[in-house]
Image (spheres, rainbow, N blue to C red):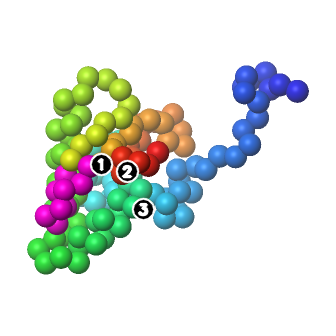
C-alpha cells in the first residue's frame, strides 16, 4: 500500500542530527566561539574530523579557538569561490598537517539549514 504523502512509502528508519550529536557521531562546533561567530547556521563535524582536532590539541601551541579560526577561515574562503551548490571541498592546516575536508549545507532535523564538516569520503 502506498503512502499518499510520500511516493516512496513510509520512512523505515531515520537518524536525527540531534541524536547523532548526542551519540557523538557528530560534534557541535557552533559552541566554539571562532566558529559560532563565523557562521549564521549551526556547524557540526563528524567524529573523524573531531578526532583530528582532538589529536592536534595535544600539540604544544594548539588550542580550540585557533583551530576553529582556521577551519572557519578556510571554509569561508571556499564558500566565496563557489557559485551555488550544497557542498564544497576545502583545505586547512591543523597542527602543521594539511587536511582536505568537505562541507555540506542542508536541512537538519528541521528545514532550517545546518552545516556539516567531514572527510571527503564521508557522507
**First in sequence: mark 3 or mark 2?**
3
Measured Cα–Cα span from mark 3 to mark 2: 8 Å
Is 95 included in the stretch rendered in magenta? Answer: yes
Q: Is residue 114 left or right of residue 34?
A: right
Q: Which residue is mark 1?
A: 101
Question: Compared with residue 93, is residue 116 higher up or lower down, i.e. above or below?
Answer: above
Is 108 included in the stretch rendered in magenta? Answer: no
Q: Which residue is mark 2?
A: 118
> Residue drawn at (35%, 67%), measured in percent from left and top?
51
Q: Quadrant of residue 52?
A: bottom left
Camera-side residue: 91 or 106?
91
Q: Is residue 74 left or right of residue 12?
A: left
Q: In what element is the residue under mark 1?
A: strand
Q: Which residue is mark 3?
A: 47
> If the image is split into quadrants, where does the N terminus sit?
top right
Measured Cα–Cα span from mark 1 to mark 2: 6 Å
Q: Position of residue 29 (x, y in %)?
A: 34, 57
Looking at this view, name the residue that lies furthest to the front: 121
Camera-side residue: 109 or 14?
14
Question: Compared with residue 1, is residue 34 higher up or lower down, i.e. above or below?
Answer: below
Question: Compared with residue 1, is residue 38 higher up or lower down, i.e. above or below?
Answer: below
Q: In what element is the residue under mark 3?
A: helix
Looking at this view, name the residue that lies furthest to the right: 1
Task: Tell me which segment is drawn in magenta.
Answer: 92-100
> Residue drawn at (35%, 59%), measured in percent from left and top?
49
Camera-side residue: 17 or 60?
60
Q: In what element is the residue under mark 2?
A: strand
Q: Position of residue 118 (x, y in %)?
A: 37, 50
Question: Marks 2 and 3: in contact by CB < 8 Å?
Answer: no
> Residue drawn at (38%, 31%), measured in percent from left and top?
86
**First in sequence: mark 1 or mark 2?**
1
Amino acid at each position: 500500500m502506498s503512502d499518499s504523502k510520500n511516493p516512496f512509502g513510509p520512512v523505515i528508519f531515520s537518524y536525527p542530527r540531534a541524536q547523532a550529536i548526542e551519540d557523538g557521531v557528530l560534534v557541535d562546533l557552533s559552541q566554539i566561539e571562532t566558529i559560532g561567530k563565523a557562521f549564521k547556521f549551526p556547524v557540526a563535524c563528524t567524529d573523524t574530523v573531531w578526532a583530528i582536532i582532538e589529536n592536534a590539541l595535544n600539540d604544544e601551541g594548539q588550542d580550540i579557538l585557533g583551530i576553529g579560526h582556521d577551519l572557519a577561515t578556510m571554509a569561508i574562503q571556499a564558500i566565496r569561490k563557489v557559485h551555488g551548490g550544497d557542498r564544497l571541498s576545502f583545505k586547512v592546516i591543523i597542527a602543521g598537517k594539511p587536511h582536505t575536508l568537505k562541507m555540506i549545507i542542508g536541512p537538519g532535523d528541521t528545514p532550517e539549514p545546518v552545516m556539516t564538516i567531514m572527510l571527503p569520503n564521508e557522507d
